[in-house]
Image (cartoon, rainbow, N blue to C red):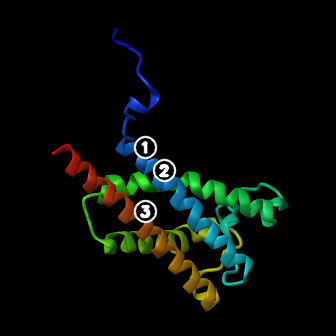
Amino acid sequence: MKNNRQFEQDQTEKPMTYRMKVVLIGFFGGLIWSLVAFFGFFFNFMNFGPALILMPWELGAWKNTYIGQGVGVLVIAILSILIAFLYKWMMQKLNTMWAGVGFGAILWVIVFYICNPFIPGLKTVPNLDRNSIITSACLFLLYGLFIGYSISYEYQQQQISSS
């Protein structure tokens, strides 16, 4: 007599979609690198931390506390999902680490030159101290590298598996 039951270990799991991988890359990229930015702020490598993203809005004095830094980390992680999709849309086919590094450099320029007038309390780049400039630039470059290379890698893997 044949048993028609399937055991759990006999079932195959559906692979994660490319879109879901981009969401996870974006979220964890933002989470990891904003936590590194928080430590950079905590150890006085930078004059600002992840709460910088909250500064354009009047949310109260709490945004300058460690709670504000934590909320800033979460906001950056969520916003990073959109940034990951932007990279996917524009540059996913570039399978080189330099594309991601360049992407991070462009993001740094956007934040510190273009968005600077809208962020109260953020000094202009010539008025920032050297440690803040170098640390933030390195974090943006590493963030761009993480997002860019991870998405390009997943894109290449998807192309291999679909052919």
Mark 3 or 1 closer to N-term? 1
| Residue at image location 27% in from the left, 53% down from the top | 157
- If the image is split into quadrants, where does the C terminus sit? top left
| Residue at image location 59% in from the left, 60% down from the top | 31
The residue most toward the top is 1
Give the residue number, with chain letter if any, for mark 1.
20
Mark 2 near mark 1, Cβ–Cβ under 8 Å?
A: yes
Give the residue number, with chain letter if any, for mark 2.
24
Instruction: Give SS at disc 3.
Output: helix
Instruction: Give SS at disc 1.
Output: helix
Dot 1 amino acid type: Met
| Residue at image location 21% in from the left, 50% down from the top | 159
Residue in front for this viewpoint, 139 or 48: 139
Other residues around mark 3 within 10 Å, as few (<14) / some (14–19) / many (≥20): many
Q: Using the numbered discs, state the Cα–Cα distance from disc 2 to disc 1 in whole angstroms.
A: 6 Å
> Where residue 3 appears, x then y in whole percent?
38, 13
